[in-house]
Image (cartoon, grey):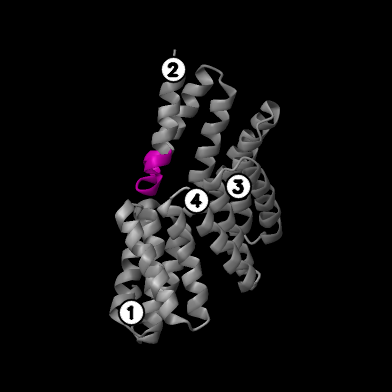
Amino acid sequence: MPKISNIINLLRTSNEVRVSDLNKSIELATESLKLSREINNQELIGKSLNQLALYHMIQGNHQICLQLSEQAMQIFKELNNEAGIADAKYSIASVYYKTDNYQLGLINLIECLTIYKNNKDYFNIARTQKSIGTIYEYFDDEKNAIKAYEDSIASALIISDKNLESNAYNPLSGIYLDQQDINKAYDLISKSVTIKQETGDLRGLAFALYGRGKVYFKLKELDRAESDFKEAIRIHFEMKERLGIGMAYYKLAQLYLHTNKPKELL
């Protein structure tokens, strides 16, 4: 008979390694789901489903994510567990806004944020605020996007979570780059790269390198930009991060067209 402590350890480890080995995270969460079902522990089944949904969302497996999240939400509704419901809604919202359903994404994220704030769950408050900022950017509402990102940083600082803090530096850097405040953009993205290297957040490092590459591109430091984009692509492939691969390839293609070297893409 599986022990509850063993399942909890599997879930904790799967969450810890997701920044460096997402495939391992999926493997561990799948095992925790199997063991949770063996002992018919509904709360652990729901938590396993939520973590699996999150990992599949990150990899761009949207349909799988939605199916797992819906199963988790049903369990947590029956258990009257608001935190579990919010975690399921977060993954669902992420799929919505990543597939251009921005309104539905925002509605679900605001519902999540309300629950997380009631529970003073600053980790999830920070990541939800960052996601809300992303949607405001899609709406071309830079003022509210900046506020959401700054709120995310403030929440991360409350719990001294450097990775969460640095996650918001990336999009903030992008906004300031668009506003031609290149020094501020460079300072923020450099800070993010440094933090990701220090913490070993490989997936986060790829996004930070992509952001720094954009700044180098703007500064016409094209060799440095190319190097950052290529390294971001390499890491994203390793992590099976489809969104990141597409973003980095797009910027690398722009760089090669700018330098009249489209053959490099072959």
| Residue range highlighted in magenta | 15-25
Instruction: Say whether residue 131 is left or right of residue 210.
Output: right
| Residue, far front | 158
Above-or-below relation of 14 to 2: below
**Mark 3–mark 4 contact, CB under 8 Å?**
no
Q: Which label was assigned to residue 263?
A: 1
Q: Which label was assigned to residue 158?
A: 4
Q: Residue at x 37, y 84 (%)?
A: 219
Q: Main secondary structure of the magenta part?
A: helix
Label 1 neighbourhood size at 10 Å, few (<14), some (14-19), many (20+)? few
**Residue identified by numbered label 3:** 90
Above-or-below relation of 76 to 150: above
Q: CA distance from mark 1 to mark 3?
A: 41 Å
**Residue identified by numbered label 2:** 3
Magenta-drawn stretch contains 16: yes
Label 4 neighbourhood size at 10 Å, few (<14), some (14-19), many (20+)? few
Percent coordinates x, y for residue 61 in the rendering: 52, 48
